Amino acid sequence: MDSYFDIDGPEEFLNAALETFKYQYQNVPVYKRFVDYLNVNPLEVNALEQIPFLPIEAFKNHQILDQNFSSASYFESSGTTQMVRSKHYVASLALYEKSLFKAFELFIGPAQDFIILGLLPSYLEKSHSSLIYMVDALMKRSNKAHNGYFLYDHEALFKLLKETQDQKVLLFGVSFALLDFLESQPKVSAMDLKNLIVIETGGMKGRKEEITKEELLEQLISGFGIETIYSEYSMCELLSQAYSLGQNRYECPPWMKVLVRSLDDPLQYLPQKRNGALNIIDLANRHSCAFIATQDLGKSHGTSFEVLGRIDHSDIRGCSLLVS
């Protein structure tokens, strides 16, 4: 079932979320045990706020998978060899690609319109990274001769940006790698890069001196000499992405929604513009768990949300560790 990609409005989203909840209670054993542990009666759940959200840590120690499917592959969180990493077992890579292409076209445009570059490890190096899989899939759909990864070759990236100034270019990069590139190639801002879109994917924690997201965006805007920096938000436990087209305000595709829970009471939800922890509904997670309680801090702005950082004492994880 993938009709949720055509959701139109809050009522349709609610109906699809409730159907998904009941389906996953019946077919995802780990999630059923969690719901039963909370003494929640699925027949009495009729609002998003009543749905139990599985703590994201469960992906570290359990195979969270629809019992009617086997795993086609898995996505793994980034981390050091000493860390226990999350694994998201994916029943259908085709479903994941449908989600990523539809969201990308909704917020950015058709991949075929862009030369796609990555300040990231290549797919061969990190084949179980959902971010790398996403960028690689977009490169294949783009099918441009200049597509490629440049994490270790800043001079080649600088040269290519100069050669393609009159073409539409999209550059994905983890935050610290984008800053490293600008530090090594200070003449980038002198180029006319009005056709360049930069999408930063997070990843500062543990790699450079901590700066706020606003400071990061300002440095990247200044360094590339462009008007705005885009951002992408996802994680290995999700099959969908939210995008910010500037100002650290992320928007979800129609089949994804973010709620903000209280740090003091995980069953209490906060109004707009109040800081809390992010709970994510991702209906593309049809065959794992669509209801995830993350360790990310943020706040809602109605149709968009803001990411403020990580809950204290939660694991360092994500894009900053991709090249560890």
Image: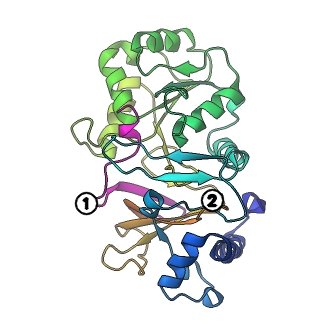
Using residue 67 as the reference point, say whether residue 88 is left or right of it. Answer: left
Residue 210 at x, y percent in the picture: 23, 42
Q: Which amino acid type corresponds to the residue marked 1 in the rendered image? A: Asp
Quadrant in which the N terminus appears: bottom right
Does the stretch in magenta take in 301? yes
Q: Is residue 299 visible?
A: yes
Is label 1 in a helix, a strand or a loop? loop
Q: Nearer the viewer, residue 34 or 101?
A: 34
Q: Is residue 245 above or below residue 223?
A: below
- Residue 97 picture quarter: top right
Residue 158 at x, y percent in the picture: 44, 13
Using residue 6 as the reference point, say whether residue 52 is left or right of it. Answer: left
Q: Which amino acid type corresponds to the residue marked 2 in the rendered image? A: Asn
The crowding category of the residue bearing disc 1, from other C-alpha atoms within 10 Å (few below 14, some 14 to 19, many at least 20), is few
Q: Earlier in the sequence, mark 2 or mark 1?
A: 2
Residue 81 at x, y percent in the picture: 34, 40
Q: Is residue 125 above or below residue 264?
A: above
Using residue 183 as the reference point, say whether residue 291 is left or right of it. Answer: right
Q: Nearer the viewer, residue 34 or 303?
A: 34
Is label 2 in a helix, a strand or a loop? loop
Does the stretch in magenta take in 319? yes
Q: Which mark is residue 285?
A: 2
Q: Which mark is residue 312?
A: 1
Q: At x 66% / y 57%, what residue is drawn? A: 284
Furthest residue to the left? 209
Q: Which residues are magenta?
A: 300-324
